[in-house]
Image (cartoon, rainbow, N blue to C red):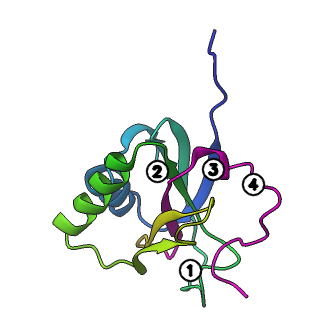
Amino acid sequence: MFDRIIFHLAIPITNIEEAKKFYGDILGSKIGRENQHAVIFDFYGHQLVGHTTKEILTPPASIYPRHFGLIFTDESDWDNLLNRCNNYNLELYQQPKLRFKNELTEHKTFFLQDPFYNILEFKFYRHYEAIFGANHIISIGDRS
């Protein structure tokens, strides 16, 4: 059988073709099953499902409290995705930056907003143990 657990996330979308362009063509996700109401993406080995909605989607006021994304364990993968976004002239929701410089939790991050106002964050931690560990450190994100 399988030796790892795969994360599943469902997000609202209003247009399947637009979602396939953003998540498939631009971000490089493989496109799986689809019907008139939903599309499944292989989002770097995890299942991301776009479900169409007739609700009016509105931009969030901030990245907090809701966003999702990926943590790359290889810095070059983070760099490659950022370059890919730049090559497609994507407007970044937040520019790349280095958080918590010279600390155990030091990481590179940038944010995107998909066409449906879902906010995505992409990270690379300098020290792998900071992803789930470093429990003695209370800094999380940019909120004060």
User: In this view, which residue lies farthest toward the left?
Assistant: 87
Position of residue 136 in the picture relative to residue 132 (left or right): right
Q: Which residue is mark 4?
A: 134
Q: What's the magenta region?
A: 117-144
Q: Position of residue 57 (x, y in %)?
A: 56, 80
Q: Is residue 77 above or below residue 90?
A: above
User: In this view, which residue lies farthest toward the right?
Assistant: 136
Q: Amino acid at mark 1?
A: Leu
Magenta region's main secondary structure?
Answer: loop
Sequence-first tag of 1 and 4: 1
Q: CA distance from mark 3 to mark 4?
A: 26 Å
Position of residue 16 in the picture relative to residue 63 (left or right): left
Tell me, for residue 36, which label it has, or none. Answer: 2
Q: Residues within 10 Å of mark 2 (few under 14, many from 20)?
A: few
Sequence-first tag of 3 and 4: 3
Count of marks overlaid on the render: 4
Position of residue 131 in the picture relative to residue 50 (left or right): right
Name which residue lies at 50% across and 53% down: 126
Name which residue lies at 60% across and 86% down: 62
SS category of the residue bearing label 3:
strand
Q: Which residue is mark 1?
A: 57
Q: CA distance from mark 2 to mark 3?
A: 19 Å
Q: Amino acid at mark 4?
A: Ala
